[in-house]
C-alpha cells in the first residue's frame, strides 16, 4: 500500500493553488494571494502571478511519461493531485491510469488500487519476444509456453503448438484471476 505523505499540502490549500478539470484532466495554477509568500510578498506575488497564474500546472514529464511538478517546495505527481482535488483527500493507495496513458489524468481514467491490482493493468513489456504478455517460445519443447504470475506465484498454463492457443490460454487466465481487460496491451 502506498503511504500518504505526511508533508502533503492540505486539501484546502491545494484548492487555493490549483484548479482541476476532471473532464480533461488538466491542472491549472490559480492566482496566488500575498499570504502564500513568506518574504518580499508584494513583489514575489506579482512575479509569480505574472508568470504562472491561469497556466497549466504540474506539466513536467518524467521518462516514464507521468506528469509532475513542484509546489510549496515539494514534488507532486499530477495524477495524485488530480485525485486529491476531485475526491477531497490524498489517495492512500496507488493511482492507476486505466487506459495506460500516464499523462491522461481525466478522473474517469484514474482509479485508486493496491499495487497488486495496478500490476494487473500493465502494458506489454518491451522485453516481450512473442508480442503477447505471458507467452514465450519454449525452444527445448518446440512449443509456445503460457504462464501468469498472481500474488508472486507463477502459474504454468501449458505448452501449445500455436501462439494463438497460448495467447488464448493466457487471456482466459487473465479473466479468471481478475486482471484488467487492458492488461498486456501494446505500448502506444
Image (spheres, rainbow, N blue to C red):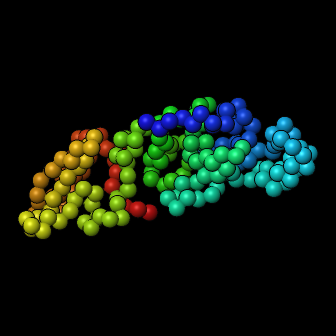
Corner quadrant of residue 175: top left
Q: Residue furthest left?
A: 141
Which residue lies at the image location 87% right of the left edge and 43% below the top edge? 39
Residue plotted at (70% across, 53% down): 56
Left or right position of 20 against 139 = right
Q: Position of residue 70 (x, y in %)?
A: 67, 50
Residue 105 is situated, as x and y percent measured from the top left of the image, at 56, 48
Please tell me which residue lies in front, 4 or 149. 4
> Outermost residue toward the right?
42
Q: Which residue lies at the image location 66% right of the left edge and 32% below the top edge?
A: 11
Q: Work out whether 86 lies above or below 163.
A: above
- When asked about the image quadrant of residue 144, the answer is bottom left
Q: Quadrant of the C terminus?
A: bottom left
User: Along the horizontal axis of the image, is 10 left or right of 128?
Assistant: right
Is residue 15 among what the camera can see?
Answer: yes
Number of numbered tags placed on the structure image = 0
Amino acid at each position: 500500500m502506498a503511504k500518504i505523505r505526511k508533508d502533503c499540502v492540505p486539501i484546502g490549500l491545494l484548492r487555493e493553488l490549483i484548479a482541476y478539470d476532471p473532464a480533461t484532466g488538466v491542472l491549472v495554477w490559480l492566482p496566488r494571494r500575498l499570504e502564500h509568500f513568506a518574504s518580499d510578498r508584494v513583489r514575489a506575488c506579482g512575479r509569480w502571478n505574472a508568470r504562472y497564474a491561469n497556466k497549466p500546472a504540474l506539466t513536467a514529464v518524467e521518462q516514464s511519461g507521468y506528469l509532475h511538478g513542484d509546489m510549496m517546495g515539494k514534488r507532486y505527481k499530477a495524477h495524485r493531485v488530480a485525485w486529491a482535488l476531485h475526491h477531497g483527500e490524498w489517495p492512500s493507495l496507488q493511482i492507476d491510469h486505466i487506459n495506460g496513458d500516464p499523462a491522461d489524468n481525466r478522473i474517469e481514467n484514474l482509479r485508486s488500487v493496491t499495487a497488486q491490482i495496478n500490476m494487473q493493468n500493465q502494458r506489454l513489456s518491451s522485453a516481450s519476444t512473442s508480442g503477447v504478455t505471458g507467452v514465450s517460445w519454449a525452444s527445448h519443447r518446440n512449443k509456445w509456453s503460457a504462464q501468469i504470475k498472481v500474488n508472486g506465484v507463477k502459474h504454468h498454463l501449458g505448452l501449445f503448438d500455436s501462439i494463438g492457443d497460448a495467447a488464448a490460454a493466457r487471456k482466459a487466465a487473465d479473466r479468471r484471476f481478475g486482471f484488467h481487460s487492458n492488461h498486456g496491451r501494446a505500448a502506444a
